[in-house]
Image (cartoon, rainbow, N blue to C red):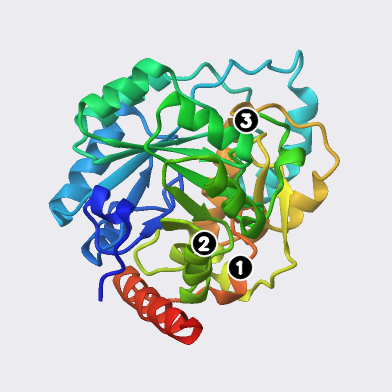
Amino acid sequence: MPLPTALTQRLGISHPIIQAPMAGGSDTPALVAAVGEAGGLGTVGAAYLAPAQILDAAKSVREKTRRPFGINLFSPLPAPTPPKDYTAAIAQLASYFADLGLPAPTPPGPPAYSFDDQMAAVLESGATVFSFAFASVPAATLAAAKARGMTVIGTATTVEEAVALEKLGVDAVAAQGSEAGGHRGSFAQPFEDAMIGTMALVPQTVDAVRVPVIAAGGIMDGRGIAAAFALGASAVQMGTAFLTCDEAGPPEAHKQAILNAREHETRITRAFSGRPARGIVNRVMTDLADAEIPEFPLQNALTRPMRTAAGKAGKADYLSLWAGQGLRMARRQKAGDLVQKLVKETEEALGRLG
């Protein structure tokens, strides 16, 4: 049975379940399409994709489904200040590279494409939703997306950020609680001041804005979806729950780490990308806990060869094992089966409350 809300009607989907964008290859076209076919909204995390790759991913999704889907980008950020000398940053990674049979990392070069280049591809992609995180976007970007008939969703980690996004003109706000896996979307405050749990963040955000609110962070089953409805959310956004699905693209070592870990074994780290993100604690995260890390995306570029090689070798200690605090509830199955199970669980939870 569909779970309709005002937001599902706007998006043209049956269920208020959004597969979170997971940049870096985890949200494969197969995953995005499977979620869409099951009645949810799949999302391509395109932050690290070149414009041509964005168009290729969108084409691949469209070949698999005619259902709506979204594309997510990281908002344009000020250019990072590179270290005067990369010697220390390279030295603290060199042993990991050596363990994986790689030469020592080299300083990253300038980006090959800009946010505007990526956005031009998004506008041509055929996606029905454009979402963003890390900051606001230029008003012209938002206007261009809306001119294409796209629904625009911004990410907030505080009420202040949600209000700012509503003033910008977004159609909905994803309220990202501190439980969420992956990168923190904070932009109005330091992330340390924006670590607000989903249970507290969502109702305060609902009270403060008129646009629909999407609950994100720690939601893994129908009980969590029902709770989000009770808090006033119009939909949920789920990442970790989909990471262990058959169609998801993280290395097998990452999937197994999620299935084996416990709720207290995640932590916020800058070690892999230079930006705060929640993942499962491993050797690199522990070793570099107090290290001076280059800013995002410089550290992300430095560690990419290590993470790629570790994924191929199945060595979880060198991977960015992004995951949220609800990981004990992760399940191994097809994405479509998960969506249908979530709908059934939500109906049962709401029935119990009734």
Find the distance from the CA under tag 1 to the CA under tag 2: 8 Å
**Earlier residue among tags 3 and 2:** 3
Find numbered disc 2 in the image and state the secondary structure of the residue it sits on: helix
Name the quadrant containing residue 272.
top right
For discs 1 and 3, the disc positioned in front in the rendered view = 3
- In the rendered image, the vertical position of residue 239 relative to residue 272, given as above or below: below
Q: Amino acid at mark 1?
A: Gly
User: Mark 3 belongs to which amino acid?
Assistant: Phe
Q: Residue at x 61, y 47 (%)?
A: 101
Q: Nearer the viewer, residue 210 or 165?
A: 210
Please give left or right for residue 177 compared with residue 9 in the image.
Answer: right
Pointer 1 local density, CA inside 10 Å: few below 14, some 14–19, many at least 20: many
Residue 326 badge: 1
Q: Is residue 170 above or below residue 29?
A: above
The correct choice, above or below, for 118 with respect to 172 in the image is above
Answer with left or right where residue 290 lies relative to residue 87: right
Mark 3 is surrounded, within 10 Å at the Cα level, by few (under 14), some (14 to 19) or many (20 or more) other residues, namely some
Residue pictured at 48% horizontal, 19% vertical: 111
Q: Mark 1 or mark 2: which comes first in sequence?
A: 2
Residue 130 position within the rendered picture, expressed as x and y whole percent measured from the top left: 34, 36
Residue 346 visible from this viewpoint: yes
- The picture quadrant where one finds residue 145 is top left
| Element class at badge 3 | loop
Residue at image coords 66%, 55%: 200
Q: Which mark is residue 240?
A: 2
SS state under label 1: loop
Instruction: Determine which residue is flagged by label 3.
Output: 187
Asked whether 144 or 212 is in front, the reply is 212
**Mark earlier in primary sequence (1, 3):** 3
Using the image, determine if residue 172 lies above or below residue 345. above
Identify residue type, mark 2: Thr
